[in-house]
Image (spheres, rainbow, N blue to C red):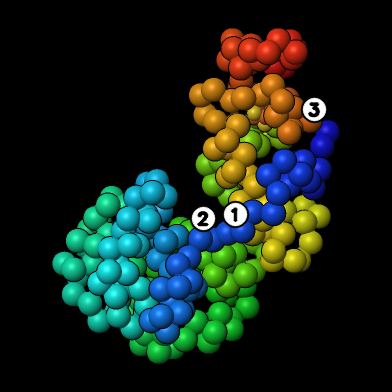
Amino acid sequence: MAGPLEVLAHLRKAYGELEWWPVDAEYHRLNATDPRFEVIVGAILTQNTTWTSVETALGNLKVRKLLSAKALAKADLPTIREAVRPAGFYNQKAGYVQGIAKYLWTTFEGDLDRFFREKTPRLRELLLSFTGIGEETADDILVYAARRPVFIVDAYTRRLTMRLGWGKGTESYAELQRMWAKRLGEEPKAFALAHALVVEHAKRRCTAKSPLCPGCPLEAVCKRVGVEATVYLRAAESGNVAKPPR
Ligand code: SF4
């Protein structure tokens, strides 16, 4: 059975070197703010919503010049609520992003280099201590803002784990992390790329309802668990893949 390294190598060959996380570098250059703070805010806002909605909310924060720890810490809550409204759950999310902004401003004067000086386990623990930051969000921040070698587990990872036949996909977060991070090394870039590849694959091919198995870069190594034969055959319109899912 193919392991994570082989699977990720297939995905890399198919989708290339994906650069994540998207930030508005020009905004931060012009405003002398830290783009890593945008990653932190985006990671919190992206919970239970689409990235398009997050982009709108981030755009609103930028228009109000609130995308820095200092500005967000000092802003009044109704203004933040209004700005992040497109991302949904705006009452809670406004409090979450201001909570960490206040901490970063009062403890480190917004200096993320100082915050990120902590070792990974301690940094993760700190992030998890904030209301509104769960394991996936903490790991998003660790990987894409602090550049640490941590495997991010999300719903796409769980679905792919099940379909590959590696497990049920309902395993604990830590268990799935161990499973996927096996032999991935210590290079932060590899972890940033791995998550981006899994997400790209889940969106482009391995979708929840109609996975496009024929021609999939993982077709040869995937057990297609939970993919109904009818879905598979419908996807195999070209007829050159007739093997039903196991
Ligand atoms: S072969 Fe199908 S089920 Fe397996 S990874 Fe590809 S799209 Fe998903």
Instruction: Kindly check if marks 2 and 1 are in contact, taking CB atoms under 8 A apart as contact.
Output: yes
Q: Quadrant of the N terminus?
A: top right
Does 192 appear above or below 239? below
Of residues 123 and 16, the one nearer the viewer is: 16
Please tell me which residue lies in front, 83 or 167.
83
Residue 185's spot in the image, x, y percent?
Answer: 79, 61
Quarter of the figure that contains the C terminus: top right
- Closer to the N terminus: mark 2 or mark 1? 2
Q: Nearer the viewer, residue 174 or 180?
A: 180
Look at 54% across and 70% down and name the residue there. Answer: 145
Q: What residue sits right under mark 3 in the picture?
A: 220
Q: Residue at x 33, y 62 (%)?
A: 59
Mark 1 C-beta to ligand 1 under 8 Å: no
Q: Amino acid at mark 2?
A: Glu
The earlier-in-sequence mark between 3 and 2 is: 2
Q: Nearer the viewer, mark 3 or mark 2?
A: 3
SS label for mark 3: loop
Against 221, is 182 above or below?
below
Whole-number angstrom distance, CA of label 2 to CA of label 1: 6 Å
Answer above or below: position of 118 versus 94. Answer: below
Q: Which residue is mark 2?
A: 136
Which mark is in front, 1 or 3? Answer: 3
Residue annotated with mark 1: 152
- State if disc 3 and disc 1 touch (CB < 8 Å): no
Label 1 element class: loop
Dot 2 falls on a residue whose secondary structure is helix
Q: Which amino acid, mark 1?
A: Ile
Relative to 40, 224 lies left or right: right
Residue positioned 45% across, 73% down in the render: 26
